[in-house]
Image: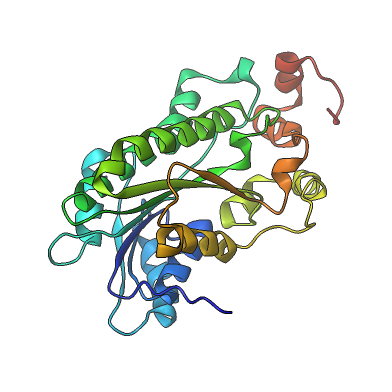
Amino acid sequence: MSINIDLGGQTALVTGGGTGIGFGIARRLLQAGATVTIVGRRQDVLENAAQRLQPDVCAGAEVRWKGCDVTVEEDVANAVASAGDRSGRLDIAVANAGSGSPGPILGQTPDSWRFSYDINVVGSAMTIKHAALAMKDSGGGAIVTISSVSALRTALYMAPYTVTKAGLDALVRCAALELAPFNIRVNSIRSGLVLSEGVMMSLDDELREAVLARTLLGRPGEAEEIGDSVLYLVSSLSRWVTGQAYSVCGGLSVCEHEDHSSLSRRIYGDEAFEALTGRSGKKS
């Protein structure tokens, strides 16, 4: 038996939708028939992404884009307004934008902690808030955040990312509890290693191979595979699911932590890194 998800006539917002996982999610939503608005900070990237997504647009739908910094509430409110239909109704929101600050805790500054917190928690909270305000008067909707297996596992020298992704999962539970009376479902996907543009730039070969060695299925995920899981969580197939976090990671969440020493050494330099961690040599 095959099950086709039809989102025809629905509207969707995807933050960080111009690249990587966000792009793959937008593609899957478009292929299912939704009108999708991708948002992000770089308008040239968004415009290019919208052009590349055009072949995936179904009849009666469209792909839109709008500049937005998710840590600025006014930007998020405007993005949600742009993503809705003519009556302002928004059916789906995906809070995908996120980032982190590698390095040992002894070297982290208040600003580096705030950077991760503002994007991963505050940005997602503002997306949930304004999406829910648009959904609550029109019968409800579905919100999905993109978390990480790091929310479950302790990654060495990646504390701000790990802590704020765990906080994001807690936010999802709180939002699901508060928004249930409005028929708004809120869930999370904990992604494993997806070789997006950002990952390819930040993780060296050694660290990527270490993560893959702990991934039971033996390969990185594809952005569209995260999009497949989003499709389930925003469709009627999951109509009795809310407040949950699903690991979509090839089995990475089953295994032990990875070591971000090599990335931290690149950022801090060997001498500063070893002074902050007490670990000498290239291997940790």
Residue placed farthest to the left in the image?
87
Q: Position of residue 153 (x, y in %)?
A: 67, 33
| 24 with respect to 273 (left or right) | left
| 136 with respect to 159 (left or right) | left
Q: Position of residue 251 (x, y in %)?
A: 73, 49
**Residue 78 shows in this picture:** no
Q: Residue at x 25, y 61 (%)?
A: 83
* Number of marks: 0
Q: Residue at x 21, y 49 (%)?
A: 136
**Residue 267 shows in this picture:** yes
Q: Is residue 107 above or below residue 244?
A: above
Q: Position of residue 24 (x, y in %)?
A: 51, 64
- The quarter holding residue 159 reads top right
Colour pattern:
rainbow
| Image quadrant containing the C terminus | top right
Give 48 or 215, whichever is nearer the viewer.
215
Give 246 or 273, whichever is nearer the viewer.
246
| Image quadrant containing the N terminus | bottom right
Q: Residue at x 40, y 75 (%)?
A: 6
- The quarter holding residue 36 reads bottom left
| 244 with respect to 42 (left or right) | right
Give 279 or 267, whichever is nearer the viewer.
279
Q: Position of residue 81 (x, y in %)?
A: 19, 55
Residue placed farthest to the bottom in the image?
59
